[in-house]
Amino acid sequence: MKFSLAAVLAITGLAAAAPQWGSQVSRPATSSASSASQVSRPSATSSFTPPAPSCLTSSDATTLVNGFQSLISNYTLATAEKLLSNDFTDTSDSINILAGYPLGSTTFPSKAAFEAGQGSQPALPMTILSIDSVDCTKVGFRWTITIDPTKPVVKGINSIASSYNTTTRAWQIKTVYSEFNSCHWMNLIGGTCKGPGQ
Ligand SMILES: *[C@@H]1O[C@H](CO)[C@@H](O)[C@H](O)[C@H]1NC(C)=O
Ligand SMILES: *[C@@H]1O[C@H](CO)[C@@H](O)[C@H](O)[C@H]1NC(C)=O
């Protein structure tokens, strides 16, 4: 099939948000801690290092979602290395059942496992429908992937958690939870999934 397991695995990264979303996402109130880090300090020297932010901004969230989308739609190892934390994991029973992995297991238990799986997958056109929630470290969003342009898209929901990398001074994706219409996906790639009596 044109899209097989590779396509399934790609979903994991699907979470990315389109850049234009940024303007639509309401900015959560900035915490006092992150506000402090954004205040310019007149006495700061070139060696001054601001404290790590304690919470995501909506802009940070959009950057993470966009990055995740690019891992699905246009994977590069460089992006994965930059975007994913060293303790990255990705969990999806939707992928597990398509891939034949045990239900309940961690689909990609490491950054290396994700890179190996995602890096060998065909690009999947993913559209971010919306970023629906941003809290201090987590982002929730909805997406679609087109597998067959003549058939309905596959719809899914992701929740990602992030951690701040004090070396690169950027937020990274630490965990991904992704679930989607794996029955429809199964049918699109040549499998059979039906409800009783259908
Ligand atoms: C995919 O990523 C590469 C490398 O970053 C970039 O040059 C290219 O324009 C991207 N393609 C799309 C369709 O975004
Ligand atoms: C932060 O990023 C750097 C550069 O990619 C990497 O070497 C380091 O391991 C990262 N730290 C964590 C906790 O992921």
Image (cartoon, helix red, strand yellow):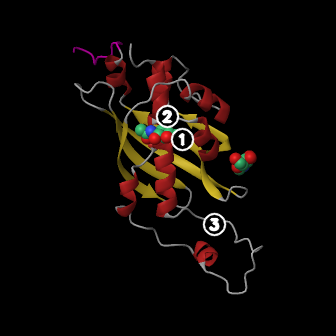
Q: Amino acid at mark 1?
A: Val
Does residue 10 show up magenta in the picture? Answer: no
Kindly identify which residue carries mark 3.
Answer: 53
**Residue at the image position 56 percent from the left and 49 percent from the top:** 161
Q: Residue 80: where, in percent of width, then height?
A: 59, 40
Residue 14 seen anywhere in this rendered image of the structure: no
Figure quadrant of residue 101: top right
| SS type, badge 3 | loop
| SS type, badge 1 | strand
| SS type, badge 2 | helix
Name the residue at the bottom extreme: 42
Q: Are marks 2 and 1 in contact (CB under 8 Å)?
A: yes
The one of 146 and 89 positioned closer to us in this rendering: 146
Kindly identify which residue carries mark 2.
Answer: 12
Numbered range of the magenta stretch: 190-198
Q: Amino acid at mark 3?
A: Pro
Q: Residue 142: where, in percent of width, then height?
A: 37, 45
Kindly identify which residue carries mark 1.
Answer: 176
